[in-house]
Image (cartoon, rainbow, N blue to C red):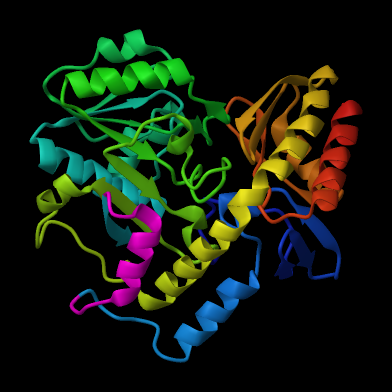
């Protein structure tokens, strides 16, 4: 045995990718409705991103954070504008670790409220913030994390006091079953946090970089978080994470409080900059594709195997009353790539750049497959 058995891998080897088409070792093509778990938002092997990578690779790949890195400044400006200060890491979990640390440093308070069925990563603080017993199983969790019930403001009120540094949430719980936040719940949560001088951390690792139809999902909920985390699609396939905080909190992450050897390295920043440029051209037209997706999904509710269809933008969850793992495997045999999520949910995260015809074909295959269950 050469690899740990912590992943369950399908017996498929992919050798080539282009936008929403993945090609396996036999030359067979698959329709990608997963974006590599929400990573290829601007399509696999995007030419603009590839060219940016090649250009930077010809210069140099690595630069330690001991020296000025103008590429980091460029990406930070494209990502957070003038309102946020940015720290770059290598993953969503690392970005969430930085957010938790910053919230505690900035407020001098120990506790973080997160939510049941949330997912924030598998490093220790991120895992402790995750409100899922299955993620905690067999391990002691860190102190200082409290779990409220998602979309239920009374459960937040019961936990909130002057020891709470921040409330941490996803605006669509991805791994927890593609469950969107209720807008009234969010409005009340924001008001409650402001009343208690408690920060709001929004985990946009999966919902960000255009996934829900805007650069960040919080834009659709009418508020500006104190801290935002991003990763997955930010560099369209290269490992990156970012923690954005309102400028007034920047001094709390002072020299020596946090760092990363590879975080914000030039190769990744070149890819991220190109990805964000691509996103600017894609977002104005993505609403038409979102409409097609949800028009198609609206017909799924009539299927016997389907309990519910929910989500936001290009992020959809189909709640099933049959085993989702078998559905994912059956779809792979029909050359459609989809994902599972909590509560027996089939999760769809198509690239924002997927051709509408290919999207429709993929959804038709899923509907036909489910209709036979």
In the shown orientation, is residue 114 left or right of residue 251?
A: right
Q: Nearer the viewer, residue 68 or 131?
A: 68
Where is residue 345 drawn, in percent x and y? 65, 29
- Which residue corresponds to the image point at 77% horizontal and 61% vertical from the top-left? 21
**Start and end of the magenta stretch?**
66-83
326 relative to 275 in the view: left or right: right
Identity of the residue drawn at 32% across and 34% down: 129
Residue at image coords 13%, 32%? 110
Q: Quadrant of residue 369?
A: top right
Whole-percent x and y of residue 228? 34, 44
Q: Quadrant of residue 128?
A: top left
* 365 shown above or below 371: below
Residue 142 visible (yes or no): yes
**Split into 4 quadrants, where in the image is the N terminus?**
bottom right
Could you tell whether 43 is left or right of 255 in the image? right
Q: Is residue 80 magenta?
A: yes
- Residue at image coords 30%, 15%: 156
Compared to 80, does 218 lie above or below? Answer: above
């Amino acid at each position: 045995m050469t690899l740990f058995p912590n992943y369950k891998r399908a017996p498929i080897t992919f050798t080539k990718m282009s936008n929403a088409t993945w090609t396996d070792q036999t030359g067979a093509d698959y329709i990608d409705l997963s974006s590599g778990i929400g990573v290829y938002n601007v399509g696999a092997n995007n030419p603009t991103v590839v060219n940016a990578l090649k250009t930077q690779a010809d210069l140099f790949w690595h630069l330690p954070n001991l020296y000025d890195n103008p590429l980091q400044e460029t990406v930070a400006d494209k990502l957070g504008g003038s309102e946020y200060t940015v720290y770059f890491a290598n993953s969503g979990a690392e970005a969430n670790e930085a957010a938790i640390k910053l919230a505690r440093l900035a407020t001098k308070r120990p506790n973080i409220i997160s939510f049941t069925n949330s997912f924030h990563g598998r490093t220790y603080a991120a895992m402790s913030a995750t409100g899922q017993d299955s993620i905690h199983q067999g391990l002691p969790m860190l102190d200082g994390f409290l779990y409220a019930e998602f979309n239920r403001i009374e459960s937040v009120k019961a936990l909130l006091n002057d020891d709470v540094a921040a409330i941490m949430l996803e605006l669509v719980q991805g791994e927890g079953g593609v469950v969107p936040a209720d807008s009234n719940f969010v409005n009340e949560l924001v008001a409650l946090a402001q009343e208690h001088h408690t920060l709001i951390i929004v985990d946009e690792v999966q919902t960000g970089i255009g996934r829900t139809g805007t650069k960040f999902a919080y834009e659709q909920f009418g508020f500006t978080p104190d801290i935002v985390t991003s990763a997955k699609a930010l560099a369209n396939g290269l490992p990156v994470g970012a923690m954005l905080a309102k400028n007034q909190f920047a001094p709390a992450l002072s020299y020596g409080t946090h760092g990363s050897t590879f975080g914000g390295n030039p190769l990744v920043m070149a890819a991220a900059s190109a990805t964000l440029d691509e996103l600017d051209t894609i977002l104005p037209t993505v609403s038409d594709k979102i409409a097609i997706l949800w028009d198609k999904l609206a017909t799924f509710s009539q299927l016997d195997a389907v309990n519910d269809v929910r989500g936001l933008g290009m992020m959809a969850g189909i709640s099933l009353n049959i085993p989702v793992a078998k559905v994912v495997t059956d779809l792979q045999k029909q050359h459609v790539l989809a994902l599972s999520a909590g509560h027996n949910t089939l999760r769809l995260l198509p690239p924002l750049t997927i051709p509408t015809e290919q999207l429709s074909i993929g959804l038709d295959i899923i509907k036909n497959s489910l209709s036979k269950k």
